[in-house]
Image (cartoon, helix red, strand yellow):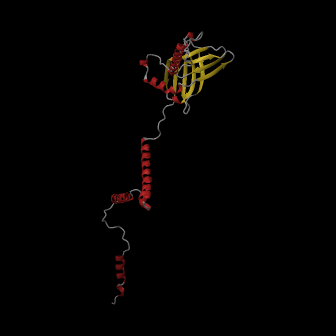
Amino acid sequence: VSRMSSPCHTSAVLLVFMALAVGVGAEQPKERSCDVIGDESSESQMERALLKKLEPLSEMRFNVTVEKGKTENYIYHFRVCREVNSTLHDFGGLVQTDRQNGRTTVIGRINETQVFNGSDWIMLIYKGGDSYGRHCSGEKRRAVIMISCKRGVTASSFSIISEEREKEQDCFYLFEMDSNVACPAEDSHLSVGSILLITFASLIAVYIIGGFLYQRLVVGAKGMEQFPHFAFWQDLGNLVADGCDFVCRSKPRNAPAAYRGVGDDQLGEESEERDDHLLPM
């Protein structure tokens, strides 16, 4: 019996190890994300784009504590398009915890999300929270989170602004926070002409410096001949000068000059006239 029990024991151990390996290798369940109110087909491209912009914040957790005397002492837990406590499977995206008795209240759920934006802000709304008791006609709670643009900051300054619960309906909790995900894309301050000018200047600099080094180090040129294609540019300059001379002159090229300088011919004639009085009479 002992001889047969050994193989059975070995097989049982192998089965246990295989089960553990399968358990470890199994993928963790994916966290739920925001579901915009309405059918999936009714979601606009703008809403999908905004939810995509908010994804960098989905791995972060935000908390704020509020104390009002001895009667109200709460902690608000918030996640962007994720459940605060995924083990409860309650879709709670913003949850209130009473620090005195530990009771939790879901303010808003991610499966009833609304999202829209302005030029430098994004408004995220979680609806479908736990029902009010004596307030707001017993309707379900709602969380409104205003995300304002702040460049250079992934997320900061999460705080509660107010709780509007003195109305008959449409009550809400208002929160705010700062994040760079709400900022508009920065436009380039350079015009197309400026970009072309910078590119052209860069090419010229590369041409001159590279040509100079080649002429000096490889060809062994000295002086002005170190300038790349010196003969070509010299001829080009002469042609340009001739063209300007031809175009810019206002008189024909063969017209006599208005001013006659003192030449040898004038000096000779004048000397002959001066010597006439020396001849004998």
The number of callouts visible is 0
On the rendered structure, is 90 left or right of 48? right
Residue 33 visible? The answer is no
On the rendered structure, is 184 left or right of 166? left
Q: Specify the quadrant that holds the C terminus.
A: bottom left
Residue at (36% x, 86% y) in the render = 277
Residue farthest to the bottom, as pictured = 280
Q: In this view, does 170 lie above or below 200?
A: above
Whole-percent x, y for residue 241 in the image:
36, 59
Residue at (36% x, 81% y) in the render = 271
Residue farthest to the right, as pictured = 70
Whole-percent x, y for residue 126 in the image:
53, 18
In front here: 108 or 270? Answer: 108
- Residue 79: which quarter of the image? top right
Whole-percent x, y for residue 86 in the image:
55, 18
In front here: 81 or 59? Answer: 59
Q: Is residue 73 above or below residue 252?
A: above
